[in-house]
């Protein structure tokens, strides 16, 4: 069996003798690591009776073309950027998709069904949440998509699971983002609406390529809504 990605895990809930009922698999952005979003968890101020396992996987280290081939943690290579499109590394995307699917399977084996699993991600990690979540053969509890975009939209149109059109999707982006242009997120939202994803939430915040407290509050509200 292929080795699972190494992960940082945090279990939220007042009664540690009870197993988690839900899991959030949260992917970091380019060049970051599994610890990047760990400090966000206490800031969510989730109710004590919510039993949620947060799983933060580390992306593999690989050379990244747009960063002069410098090796860093990346879910896939980024070959080029332009004003209107992104060249993507399809092989890297699909390999990382399989690695995230393996983490979903492990959560299933630990007693959390797929319908109680949320995929979350920031920037490149957001792209992986879309790449994996929209193709999931079983319905997920939801997606949290922060400061990112949908890669391979044309292929996703042919590959997405139409049984999941009512899957809740939270989309958030900074209006001053200099790294991932907000137009990429807007194009993703338009793709989702055109493909009949009916439970999308769209939020923007006056910030750059980052997270702020208002966004964290909205993420918390979304999580509480989809983890009854």
Image (spheres, rainbow, N blue to C red):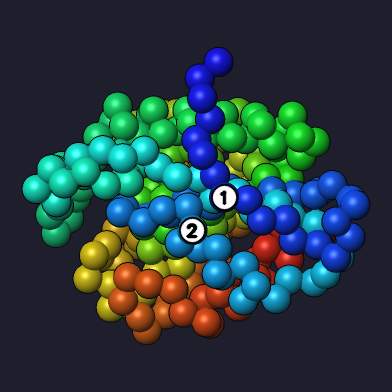
Question: Which corner quadrant holds the C terminus?
Answer: bottom right
**Label 2: few (<14), some or many (≥20) within 10 Å?**
some
- In the image, 222 versus 168, the foreground residue is 222
From the viewer's perspective, tell me whether residue 147 is left or right of residue 223: left
Q: State which tag comes first along the sequence, 2 or 1.
A: 1
Question: Which corner quadrant holds the N terminus?
Answer: top right
From the viewer's perspective, tell me whether residue 113 is left or right of residue 49: left
Could one spot residue 84 in this view of the protein? yes
Q: Which mark is residue 196?
A: none
Quadrant of the rendered structure where residue 94 is?
Answer: top left
Q: Residue at x 53, y 30 (%)?
A: 4
- In the image, 227 versus 213, the foreground residue is 213
From the viewer's perspective, tell me whether residue 51 is left or right of residue 192: right
Residue 133 location (% of width, % of height) = 53, 41
From the viewer's perspective, tell me whether residue 172 is left or right of residue 105: left
Pointer 2 and pointer 1: residues touching (CB < 8 Å)?
Answer: yes
Q: Residue at x 21, y 43 (%)?
A: 71
**Label 1: few (<14), some or many (≥20) within 10 Å?**
some
Helix, strand or loop at mark 2: loop
Q: Residue at x 74, y 29 (%)?
A: 109
Q: Residue at x 73, y 71 (%)?
A: 46
Q: Residue furthest top?
A: 1
Q: Mark 1 = which residue?
A: 8
Residue 21 location (% of width, % of height) = 81, 48
Could one spot residue 66 in this view of the protein? no
Q: Reply above or below: 50 against 115.
A: below
Helix, strand or loop at mark 1: strand
Q: Which mark is residue 35?
A: 2
């Amino acid at each position: 069996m292929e080795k699972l990605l190494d992960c940082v895990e945090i279990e939220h809930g007042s009664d540690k003798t009870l197993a988690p009922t839900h899991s959030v698999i949260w992917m970091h952005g380019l060049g970051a690591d599994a610890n990047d979003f760990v400090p966000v968890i206490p800031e969510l101020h989730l109710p004590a009776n919510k039993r949620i396992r947060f799983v933060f996987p580390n992306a593999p280290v690989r050379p990244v073309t747009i960063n002069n081939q410098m090796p860093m943690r990346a879910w896939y290579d980024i070959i080029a950027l332009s004003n209107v499109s992104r060249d993507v590394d399809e092989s890297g995307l699909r390999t990382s998709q399989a690695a995230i699917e393996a983490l979903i399977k492990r959560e299933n084996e630990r007693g959390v069904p797929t319908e109680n699993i949320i995929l979350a991600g920031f920037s490149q990690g957001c792209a992986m949440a879309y790449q994996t979540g929209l193709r999931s053969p079983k319905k997920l509890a939801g997606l949290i998509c922060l400061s990112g975009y949908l890669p391979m939209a044309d292929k996703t149109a042919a590959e997405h699971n139409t049984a999941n059109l009512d899957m809740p999707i939270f989309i958030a982006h900074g209006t001053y983002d200099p790294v991932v242009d907000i137009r990429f997120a807007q194009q993703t939202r338009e793709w989702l609406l055109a493909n009949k994803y009916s439970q999308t939430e769209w939020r923007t915040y006056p910030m750059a390529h980052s997270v702020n407290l208002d966004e964290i509050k909205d993420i918390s509200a979304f999580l509480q809504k989809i983890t009854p």
